[in-house]
Amino acid sequence: MKQDLNPPMERVVQPLLCIGKVPYLPHYTKKHHWVSPGKGPQTVKTTTELMALNAKLDMTPLWPRHWTRLLNLVQ
């Protein structure tokens, strides 16, 4: 049996911000940037923009984004 040299990365609990039913996931590398499904500049918002829109915080297992460890998020 062939050994998988690239096993899937383990997921860890990460913050998720939602505007209505639209989820915004943390960007992989850009601190305080959140990405929604789709394409184009309207799919990327900053933490400040999302908070101004009364985004709701949720937590979900995702691949690690190292900058989210710096956030002080309380549910």
Image (cartoon, helix red, strand yellow):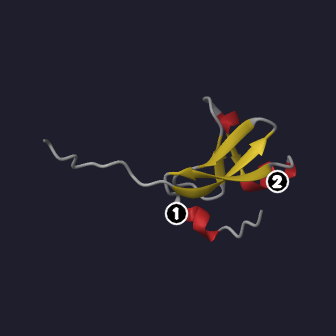
Residue drawn at point x = 68 percent, y = 43 percent = 24
Whether the residues at callouts 2 and 1 have beta carbons within 8 Å, the answer is no
Q: Is residue 7 left or right of residue 63?
A: left
Please name the residue that numbered disc 1 is placed on: 66
Instruction: Indicate whether 3 appears above or below 32.
Output: above
Total labels: the figure holds: 2
Q: Residue at x 65, y 38 (%)?
A: 36
Badge 1: residue crowd in 10 Å (few <14, some 14–19, many ≥20):
few
- Residue 35 appears at what percent x and percent y? 63, 42
The three-letter amino acid code for the residue at tag 1 is His
In x, y percent, where is residue 44?
66, 42
Q: Nearer the viewer, residue 37 or 33?
A: 37
Taking depth in this image into account, of 22 and 2 the one nearest to the observer is 2
Pick the residue in front: 26 or 56: 56
Left or right of 58, for residue 6 = left
Q: Position of residue 60 (x, y in %)?
A: 62, 51
Tag 2's secondary structure? helix
Q: Is residue 2 above or below residue 26?
A: above
Question: Of residues 66 and 1, which is closer to you in this image?
Answer: 1
What's the mark number on residue 14? none
Residue at the limit of the structure toward the left, as seen here: 1
**x then y, percent, for residue 46:** 71, 51
Q: Secondary structure at mark 1?
A: helix
**Farthest residue, direction front:** 1
From the image, tell me which residue sits under label 2.
Answer: 51
Instruction: Give me the C-alpha separation between circle 2 and circle 1.
Output: 21 Å
